[in-house]
Image (tube, rainbow, N blue to C red):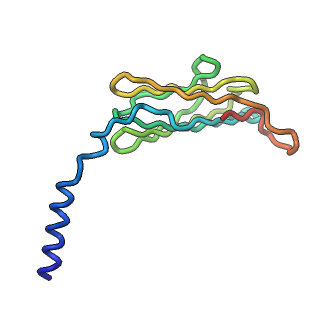
Amino acid sequence: MKGSLIAMAALCVAAAAAPASATDTYYPLTVDSLSGAQYSYGFFFANASAHASEPIIDGHLLVNGVAAAGLRIEEYRTGDGLGAIWKFTGYTTVVIPGDVLTLVVTDASGDSAQRQAVCIAPTTKKKSDLTAFCQ
């Protein structure tokens, strides 16, 4: 029992001496991923993610440089706000092959980052309702 208490005390001291939180390390605002799909029956779906050292305050989707309209946006953030995942969905035609999706993200310090995904037509070897795939 006494050995267990000593081990617990040593663990607490070691934890207190550990480096400060990960927020003390600078991570530039980075858009990690962006992909999307447009279907022939009008459904559009896109996913995106980003991380930073400062809390992320905004993320929005552009199509050929213009804000994508008519989409439902779901945003999921990490507890500290340093990471975010977005899901964009809607029954509307958003992209066609040749379009460029862009996610623009801004953090609390005012920095912004973006990632682009070019939309292409799916292969014609397999029957599909997919009309454009963006990656």
Residue 127 found in image quarter: top right
Residue 126 found in image quarter: top right
Q: Position of residue 59 (x, y in %)?
A: 48, 28
What residue lies at 53% left-to-right and 33% top-to-bottom?
73
What residue lies at 55% left-to-right and 29% top-to-bottom?
115
Q: Is residue 29 above or below residue 14?
A: above
What residue lies at 18% left-to-right and 73% top-to-bottom?
7
Q: Is residue 105 above or below residue 125?
A: above
Q: Is residue 109 above or below residue 5?
A: above
Quadrant of the snapshot with the C terminus:
top right
Instruction: Left or right? Give the position of 85 relative to 123.
Output: left
Q: Position of residue 133 (x, y in %)?
A: 72, 35
**Residue lying at the far bottom of the rendered structure:** 1
Quadrant of the snapshot with the N terminus:
bottom left
- What is the tally of numbered marks visible in this picture? 0
Q: Position of residue 50 (x, y in %)?
A: 47, 36
Instruction: Left or right? Give the position of 25 relative to 14.
Output: right
Q: Position of residue 13 (x, y in %)?
A: 15, 61
